[in-house]
Image: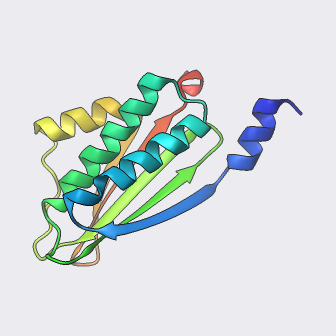
Amino acid sequence: MTDVEARDDALHDTKIDVEVPAAGEYLSVLRTAAAGLAARMDFTLDDIEDLRIAVDEASSMLLAQANPGSRLSCRFVLGGDTVTFSASVRSRCPQLPSRDGFAWTVLTALASSVDVRLTEPDLLTIELTRRRPDAQG
């Protein structure tokens, strides 16, 4: 087994859950986690930065609708060649982000895939996946 295969096996389906107060001051925790995990997956420096910005953008979109005093619940899932980030927040009047807006355009440009969904009457979730550069094919 090569070093790359061993690393991929060790990281496959690893889940990291992070919950922070739904406030902008805590976004640095999520950006740092994203960067550290992407570096562990051998992402390039540019791709690490793209993932950091995507995580920040998705989280910011959710914070804009968060109930006061609520929490931002996040999960990073490491696949063989991907990092998937999902974040959820409770909102009194959740609305799906506009797919025509600048923030959505930035988010979809930085991630390999993006999904947004409303579950329960008040839980808004954004999920994005970024593939390791050599796996984009």
Residue 118 or residue 67, whichever sits in front: 67
**Relative to 97, is 92 above or below?**
below
Count of picture labels: 0
Provide residue 74's location: percent of width, then percent of height.
40, 62
Which residue appears at 24% of the width and 67% of the height?
22
The quadrant where residue 70 appears: bottom left
Q: In this orientation, which residue lies closer to the viewer: 133 or 24? A: 24
- x and y percentages locating residue 36 in the rendered image: 51, 43
Q: Dividing the picture into quarters, in which one does residue 116 lie?
A: bottom left
Give the position of the C terminus as an image quadrant.
top right
Res. 127 in view: no
Residue 48 is situated, as x and y percent measured from the top left of the image, at 45, 32
Question: In the image, is 134 to the left or to the right of 124?
Answer: right
Say whether residue 38 is visible: yes
For residue 106, above or below residue 71: above
Rendered view: 4 above or below 99: above
Towards the viewer: 53 or 130: 53
> What residue is shown at x 32% (from left), y 65% (from top)?
88
In this view, the residue in front, 123 or 40, is 40
In the rendered structure, the answer to whether residue 62 lies left or right of residue 17 reads left
Most distant residue in the right direction: 1
Find residue 43 and report its image quarter. top right
Picture residue at 46% right of the left edge, 40% below the top: 35
Q: Residue at x 81, y 31 (%)?
A: 3
Q: Which quadrant holds the N terminus?
A: top right
Residue 66 image position (x, y, % from top left) = 17, 68
